[in-house]
Amino acid sequence: MKEFKLENEPKIESGFKTPDHYFDHFSAKVLQQLPESEPKVISIFQKRKAVIMMVAALLVLALMIPIYTSISTTPKELDQTTLENYLAYQSSLNQYDLISELETEDIAKMQPVSSAEDKVIEDILTTDTDMQHLLIE
Amino acid sequence: MQEELEFIKKLLNPKTQNEAFKELLLEYQRPLYNHIRNIVLHHDDADDVLQNTFVKVFQYLKNFKGESKLFSWMYRIATNEALTFLNQKSKINRISSEELQNKTIDNLQADVFFDGNEIQLKLQKAIANLPQKQQLVFKMKYCEELKYEEISEILGTSVGALKASYHHAVKKIEAFVTAN
C-alpha cells in the first residue's frame, strides 16, 4: 500500500461552501443584533439614597433626645438636704427605725449635741417667765 | 501597530463606533467564518457561532485592553464560542464530543454546503481522530494557513509546542489516510 504523505500531495481544500451572497448580507444581520446603548437606569431609591439616609439618621437622633435628657437630669447621688427632707416628711420610717439603723459610734457623736440642747432648754426654762408660770401650774 | 491603535480608538468612541465596527465586520467575517466552520463543520452552525462571535466582540470591546492584537483577540473569542457550541450540542444530544464529531462528518456528505471529494472527507475523518488541541493546531496551520506566531497568540501556546503538536497531528493523519 502506498504510504500517504501530506507534503507530497497538493493542498487538500476543506470542501466547505457558503450560500450565495452569504457575506453580502451577513454584516447587516449582525448589526441588527447589536445591543443598543441603553440609558443608565438609576432606581429612585439609589437616587434619593443620601436623603433617605439623612432623614433616618435625624429620626434616630430625635428619638435619642428624651433618653439623653432623662439620663442627664437624673442625679447620680441624692443630695443630703433632699434625703433629710424625705426622711422627715415623706418617709414612713419612725424614730425607732432610724435609731436601729444608727451605729453605736454615730449615737456617741450625737451626745454632745443633745447635752448642748439640754443646756439651752434649761436656760430657756429659767429665763422665760411664761415658762416658769407654766411649770408652777 | 499605530494604525491598529487608531482603529481601536475609533471602535471605542461612541461617535465613530458603528462605522468602525462595520469595517471590522467586513475585514474579519470571511477568515473568522472559515475558522469557525473548520471547527463546527456545518454551515448553519458556523453562521450562528459567527453571529454570536461578533455580538460578543462588540459587547467586550470596552474591555479590550490592547494587550494582544485585535486579530488574535477576535480569533480567541471565535474559538471559544465554537468549542462552547460543540460542548452544548453534545450535551443536548447526550453524546460525547467525539461521537458528535463523527456523526457530523457522516452527515457531511448530505450537506448541500459541502462538496468535498473522497480525500477531503477522509481528511475530515482523520482530523476527528485527533485530540482537540492537535485538531485546532492542524486546522489553523494547514487549512487556514496561519503562521505559528499568530496561532501562538490565539491559543496562548509556545511556538515550539505548536510545532510539536502539528508534527504529531500530521503523522497521525498520514497514518489514518494510509490505513483507510
Image (cartoon, rainbow, N blue to C red):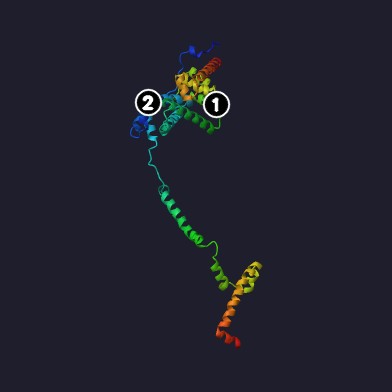
Residue A118 versus residue B101 in the image, above or below:
below
Task: Please tell me which residue is depicted at 48% across the width and 29% down the height of the picture.
Answer: B80
Horizontal placement of B24 versus A128: left or right?
left
**x, y percentage for residue A78?**
55, 65
Q: Quadrant of the C terminus of chain B?
A: top right
Chain containing the residue with disc 1: B
**x, y percentage for residue B81?**
47, 30
Mark in front: 2 vs 1:
2
Q: Residues within 10 Å of mark 2 (few under 14, many from 20)?
A: few
- Is residue B110 visible to us here? no
**x, y percentage for residue B13?**
35, 33
Q: Quadrant of residue A120?
A: bottom right
Q: Nearer the viewer, residue A126 or B105?
A: A126
| Amino acid type assigned to the residue bearing label 1 in the image | Glu
Residue B165: mark in rendering:
none
Residue B98: mark in rendering:
1
Whether the residues at callouts 2 and 1 have beta carbons within 8 Å, the answer is no
**x, y percentage for residue A52?**
43, 51
Q: Secondary structure at mark 1?
A: helix
Q: Quadrant of residue B99?
A: top right
Chain containing the residue with disc 2: B
Q: Quadrant of the N terminus of chain B?
A: top left
Horizontal placement of A26 versus B160: left or right?
left
Q: Residues within 10 Å of mark 1 (few under 14, many from 20)?
A: some
Q: Secondary structure at mark 2?
A: helix
| Amino acid type assigned to the residue bearing label 2 in the image | Glu
Horizontal placement of B4 versus A105: left or right?
left
Task: Please tell me which residue is depicted at 42% across the width and 25% down the height of the picture.
Answer: B71
Q: Nearer the viewer, residue A101 or B147?
A: A101
Residue that label 2 marks: B4
